[in-house]
Amino acid sequence: MSEVMDREQQAGTAQAAPEAAPSPASEAAVEKASLWKKWKGMPRKKRRKIVRWFIFLLILIAAGLGIRQFLAAKNSGEETEVLTDVVQYSSITSTVEGSGLTKAKDSETITIATTGTVSEVFVNEGDTVEPGTPLFIIDSDAARTAVDKARQDVLGREKQLNALLKDVAGLNLAAGYSGKLMEVVDLNPGDTISKDQKLAVLADDTRLRLTQYYSYAYEGMIHQGQSMDVSVPALMSSLSGTVEAVHMVSRITPEGTKLFSADILVENEGALTAEMAASATVTTDAGETIYPYEPGKLEYYRTGDLKSTVNGTVLSSSLVDFLQVSAGQVLVRVDGEDSEAEIYSAQQSLDEAQKTLETAEKNLANCSAVASIAGKVIGLTMKPGDEIAANTTVVTISDTSSLIVNATVDERNVSAVETGTMVELDQWGTTAMGMVESVSLSSTINNGVATYPMVISVDNAEETLQVNSYINYKLTASENDNCLVLPLQAVRTVSTEEGESLTVVYVKGDKPETAVEGVMIDEMIPEGFWPVAVEIGISDNYNVEIKSGVEEGTEVFTQIQMSSSWGF
């Protein structure tokens, strides 16, 4: 019982305890966030000034440490020597060196895109071949099938495109022949029409056709091209007609007479129309008149539906019932933007199909390959009976008499390298002379330095250089036989308090008028030396050209050398 009471008292004590005070870590975080907020709210110009002074203080600290080290070295028995050099005239040559991979300037690689079986091999590895030399034969059903399929695809897409081109001609929908419009659809500008929509019926009423039946007793007396007299009671006149065709059908009348038919065409001067009653007769050479079994009715020579061939919006329409039109007359104009897009898409598909066919035909041709260039056979290892997998490179023909080397030149020297620049080449002790064939204008940035691709060509008629092997190259990018020079270590790049970056040398003697003010020193400079800005030019491994800033004979600081007074 007492233990229970003790636990209750402890719990009550814990509940009554005051809230814990903030930890030092949380106070530091709050203070850090407050300082950062103040920094972000500060004007950019003021922040930049603070950063500049901070960097200046760091440089002063570094310089102080250098002086301290210098004094410590002096007190410990080490002596220092200030090394200088003098600006003088000399010659300087800037070279570009590196290595690249040799490649045949002209080569042909044959790849089989489909599976097949090697039937014949006519050459060996290392053989020299001429254009047209047979190389091998590979039997590939897959290659032949691919060509057949690609050809069918091209034919199908050509038909599709031709149909679209034919349809798009309907943007200006015209009458296919002369005649009369009937059953027209009322169209207004802005109306939408669809492909194959019937817009009118066009009846060719320039001629009318009359079908007549005659007794087989007159067989052979009526023939194609024969003139007939056509009587039209409604006009109370007789017209001239021509037999278009004779059909030896077998129509039996209720009286038991067997009849054949004839089609007679009548030219329409404008008074004839369909459904008029008419009869056609003819007088034989014997003077006998042949009459039809019964009168017939005139019909239009031909009729057809006038349909839209595209989807689009009506721009204008001249469709009117019973309007006489001539062949080629434009009746409806349509905006066919959608059709033009379909044609573009169909043309793209046809182009792709033709490329596929070209690739398939090339692969089939590769199955019975001949050399297209003169050169040496490289990489041929197959033999008759071998199964070739798809996308296998089976042989390469390389013209090793002329090579190229892919190299690079950096941004400092690219302006001095041009087509025709001579290049020294060295491949494991075998030397040769090459020539710059091209320098690209497109650069690649690596570690802050821009480099430009360069192609070097070299004659290898004697085949002393190995193909697909590395080779060292060296070329003179620029040179000056009479210029002011200084050692590389005498020239420094410094920053000023204003944030400007300058190339300077430290000149010995009285302070010159050209001395740079506010240089932020990051190393120990001896007394009596003053920073002077200079313009530099080309450089080699040791010296750099001085174009301006100092004159011949000027003594400048290079470095401080430490030496021990005890001789070690």
Image (spheres, rainbow, N blue to C red):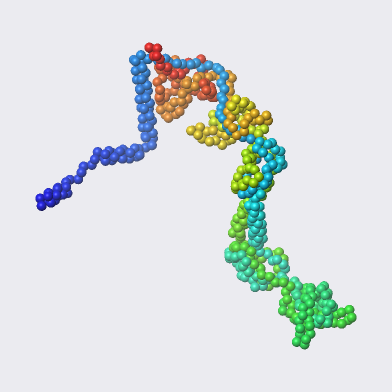
Residue drawn at x 64%, y 29% as measured from the top left:
464
Vertical arrangement, residue 438 with respect to residue 536, above or below: below
Q: Position of residue 485 (x, y in %)?
A: 53, 19
Residue 432 image-quadrant placement: top right
Which residue is at the front of the view, 220 or 60?
220
The C terminus - image quarter: top left
Which residue is at the front of the view, 202 or 136?
136
Vertical arrangement, residue 93 with respect to residue 155, above or below: above
Q: Position of residue 306 (x, y in %)?
A: 66, 68
Q: Position of residue 174 (x, y in %)?
A: 68, 64
Vertical arrangement, residue 387 with respect to residue 45, above or below: below
The mark tally for this picture is: 0
Is residue 325 toward the left or the right of residue 29 in the image?
right
Inspect this view and state whether residue 356 appears. Answer: yes
Residue drawn at x 72%, y 68% as measured from the top left:
178
Residue drawn at x 65%, y 58% as measured from the top left:
156
Inspect this view and state whether residue 438 appears. Answer: no
